[in-house]
Image (cartoon, rainbow, N blue to C red):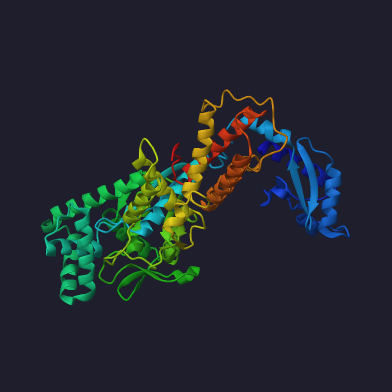
């Protein structure tokens, strides 16, 4: 509907000029379709700039603008509503024309074509479980990557893991203590829990683990084989999870690479006055920019996460000279990351505002917060397995060619939808049963709506849009037909604000409107069958594209 939007805006600008009003009109989609297809608050904005505003206020000005607009081709109704909104309802021929001209897919809004964006997300650490936080980060990061990619940018997906530090030493200690196999992911998990518990409760074990940590940093050959085998097993395990989640990475970064670079960069920053000495440590005084102080090099001359992040920035820029970096971080790390970004802006002035982050909330079950440091936790992997099993139970008795693949798709959809249906920084209470519902407000519901549309097309004898004619067009415009052209604008907003939930909300509304129409409309065999089939195809294509943006697959049978 971009063409009609331009037509209305052009006419509005002409009228405003005639009335001597210096203002730029904007059109928005009303939340309620009863208020039309486009709405403008230009009267309420303009009246504040007028030397002699009309006595009736914004509403009177809106009525004057509407009277001056007259009739607009392709618009069936223009009316004033509320305190002065001007609402535009498009004519049936406008929708039919758009559907005929675009075929089955609405054009992309490629507003950042050629822009280079690196998105870093997931960030699990070898030798530790893939926990719920990593599942959250992976889901949010993959959706943001796809939204930016769909907007025309060149996207480079990065992952960053801690392959050195106390958590590794704890796992190595546990492996040696119980003579466990570092090639088995179950043994790595058991060893980490054992080592962490000993570190917190046994002073002697804590000393042993700290000694191992120091020896790992200098590359003690005693641990080389166990370390290499354990790291390889962890990476293989993570990659298997990513395959199920539909995620891939262009580059994996590790702390063993970033730590030495980070130390050098902090020392350089110290010489420039960016960092300061404090109690034998090197810190960044964040108070000078309204933040707080963070340690970058400890009093024991070891780099902190903050210093390693600086090394990561250097590596990232070397492998992919980005225009923008977006990193997903847990909401509790927001303050820490702001300090790091401030330091980055001083070290590299050209990077100021170009190295940013998006926070994600915490997932909770009825048992409350989950921590990978305890033995009885629900990891990201175990949640996927549980949902897969529940999906298989729901499909019992159905004849499907690849039931296991469909179960994976449904399980992932249930989890991702639950994560992406609200703002990224908000906490989530995950309900396994509700998330698998086929009756609304769930990922499987969106998938099922797509399957329903594809079933109609299959019954019609083809999945191709080339046979559809549009000679007979129904007089009434279905609600979902009015929603379809909004897709590019929804994606534009979601990409601009790094908020996938706009797409989730839109797809849910679109699916509900389609299913309502499907329940009452005779499609095959009706007088306007061809046009209805074109609408079904447009819905299916939009739904599939929208699900892809969320990182959710669209199976053709469920």
Instruction: Residue at 40% x, 40% y: name it.
Output: 398
- Residue 357, how many percent across, how many down? 46, 57
Residues 54 and 445: in front is 445
Q: Is residue 257 left or right of residue 480?
A: left
Q: Quadrant of the C terminus?
A: top left
Which is more toward the observer, 408 or 493?
A: 408
Q: What residue is rendered at 58% in x and 45% in y?
A: 510
Residue at (83% x, 47% y) in the render: 66
Visible residue check, residue 465: yes
* Residue 204 percent across, percent down from the top left: 15, 75
Q: Give how far across and how far down residue 410 sits, in percent.
A: 41, 46
For residue 256, above or below residue 249: below
* Quadrant assignment for the N terminus: top right
**As drawn, is 214 to the left or to the right of 475?**
left
Q: Quadrant of residue 302?
A: bottom left
Give coordinates of residue 48: x percent, y percent.
79, 59
Is residue 349 shown to the viewer in this render?
no
The quarter holding residue 11 reads: top right
Instruction: State the residue lying farthest toward the front.
Output: 397
Residue that sits furthest to the top in the current view? 467
* Mark count: 0
Residue at point 25%, 52% (across, down): 234
Q: Is residue 114 left or right of residue 62?
A: left
């Amino acid at each position: 509907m971009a063409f009609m939007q331009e037509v209305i805006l052009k006419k509005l600008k002409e009228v405003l000029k005639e009335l001597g009003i210096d203002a730029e009109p904007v059109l928005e989609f009303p939340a309620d379709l009863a208020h039309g297809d486009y709405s403008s608050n230009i009267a309420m904005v303009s009246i504040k700039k007028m030397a002699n505003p009309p006595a009736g206020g914004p509403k009177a000005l809106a009525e004057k603008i509407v009277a001056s607009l007259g009739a607009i081709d392709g618009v069936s109704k223009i009316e004033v509503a509320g305190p002065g909104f001007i609402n535009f309802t498009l004519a049936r021929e406008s929708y039919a024309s758009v559907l005929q001209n675009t075929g089955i897919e609405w054009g992309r809004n490629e507003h950042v074509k050629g822009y280079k964006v690196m998105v870093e997300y997931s960030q699990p650490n070898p030798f530790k479980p893939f926990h719920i936080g990593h599942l959250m980060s992976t889901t949010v990061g993959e959706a943001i990557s796809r939204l930016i990619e769909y907007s025309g940018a060149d996207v480079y997906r990065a992952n960053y893991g801690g392959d050195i530090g106390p958590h590794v030493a704890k796992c190595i200690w546990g492996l040696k203590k119980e003579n466990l196999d570092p090639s088995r992911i179950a043994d790595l998990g058991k060893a980490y829990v054992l080592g962490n518990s000993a570190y917190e409760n046994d002073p002697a074990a804590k000393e042993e683990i700290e000694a191992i940590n120091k020896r790992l940093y200098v590359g003690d050959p005693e641990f080389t084989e166990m370390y290499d085998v354990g790291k390889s097993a962890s990476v293989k395990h993570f990659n298997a999870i990513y395959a199920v989640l539909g995620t891939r990475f262009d580059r994996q970064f590790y702390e063993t690479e970033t730590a030495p670079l980070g130390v050098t960069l902090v020392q350089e920053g110290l010489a420039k006055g960016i960092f300061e000495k404090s109690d034998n440590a090197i810190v960044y005084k964040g108070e000078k920019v309204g933040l707080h102080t963070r340690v970058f090099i400890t009093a024991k001359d070891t780099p902190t996460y903050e210093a390693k992040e600086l090394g990561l920035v250097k590596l990232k820029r070397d492998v992919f000279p980005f225009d923008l970096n977006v990193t997903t971080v847990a909401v509790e790390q927001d303050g820490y990351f702001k300090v790091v970004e401030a330091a980055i802006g001083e070290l590299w002035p050209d990077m100021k505002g170009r190295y940013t982050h998006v926070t994600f909330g915490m997932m909770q079950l009825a048992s409350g917060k989950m921590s990978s440091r305890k033995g009885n936790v629900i990891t990201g992997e175990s949640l996927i397995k549980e949902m897969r099993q529940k999906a298989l139970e729901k499909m019992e008795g159905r004849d499907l060619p690849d039931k296991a693949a469909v179960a994976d798709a449904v399980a992932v959809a249930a989890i991702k939808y639950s994560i992406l249906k609200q703002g990224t920084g908000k906490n989530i209470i995950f309900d396994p049963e509700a998330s698998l519902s086929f009756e609304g407000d769930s990922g499987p519901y969106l998938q099922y709506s797509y399957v329903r549309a594809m079933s109609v097309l299959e019954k019609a004898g083809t999945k191709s849009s080339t046979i559809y004619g549009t000679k007979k067009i129904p007089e009434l415009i279905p609600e979902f037909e009015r929603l379809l052209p909004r897709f590019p604008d929804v994606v534009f907003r979601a990409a601009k604000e790094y908020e996938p939930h706009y797409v989730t909300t839109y797809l849910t509304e679109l699916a509900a409107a389609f299913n309502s129409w499907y329940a009452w409309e005779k499609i095959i065999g009706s007088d306007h069958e061809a046009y209805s089939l074109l609408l079904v195809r447009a819905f299916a294509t939009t739904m599939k594209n929208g699900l892809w943006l969320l990182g959710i697959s669209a199976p053709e049978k469920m």
